[in-house]
Image (cartoon, helix red, strand yellow):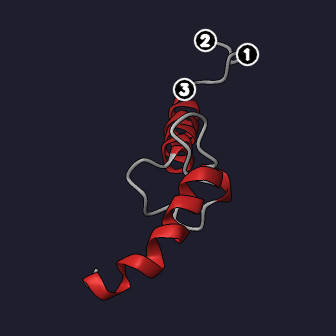
Amino acid sequence: MPQEYWEEINPLLVGFGQTICQPVKPQCFRCTLNMTCPSSTVKRSMIAQAAAAAKRAKAPPADAES
């Protein structure tokens, strides 16, 4: 980012860090960048859910007869 914008953007980034992107319990579900952010817990949880669903789809039903 060009230096000419630093002073203007700094308070916005600080506010973002204080309200959304907190170091403890970040509010990733509220963030508009959650699908592109490498630290997003939303993206990680969606990937984990998709992997679990794929695993369940491959597993035979629990009540299937042999």
State the image coordinates of residue 17 (x, y, percent, origin top left): 54, 54
State the image coordinates of residue 62 (x, y, percent, origin top left): 68, 16
Up-down: is 63 above or below 33?
above
The numbered mark, 2 or 3, whose residue comes first in the sequence reads: 3
Q: Nearer the viewer, mark 2 or mark 3?
A: 3
* Residue at (45, 69) in percent of width and height: 10
The quadrant in which residue 15 appears is: bottom right
Label 2: element kind: loop
Looking at the image, can residue 18 be seen? Answer: yes
As drawn, the residue found furthest toward the top would be 66
State the image coordinates of residue 5 (x, y, percent, origin top left): 37, 84
* Residue at (61, 11) in percent of width and height: 66
Amino acid on which disc 1 is placed: Asp
The quadrant in which residue 6 appears is: bottom left
Looking at the image, can residue 34 be seen? Answer: no
Q: CA distance from mark 2 to mark 3?
A: 14 Å
Q: Nearer the viewer, residue 3 or 46?
A: 3
Amino acid on which disc 3 is placed: Ala
Q: Quadrant of the image for the N terminus?
A: bottom left
Q: Which mark is residue 66?
A: 2
Q: Which mark is residue 59?
A: 3
Q: Which residue is mark 1?
A: 63
Mark 1 nearby-residue class (10 Å; few <14, some 14–19, many ≥20): few
Q: CA distance from mark 1 to mark 2?
A: 9 Å
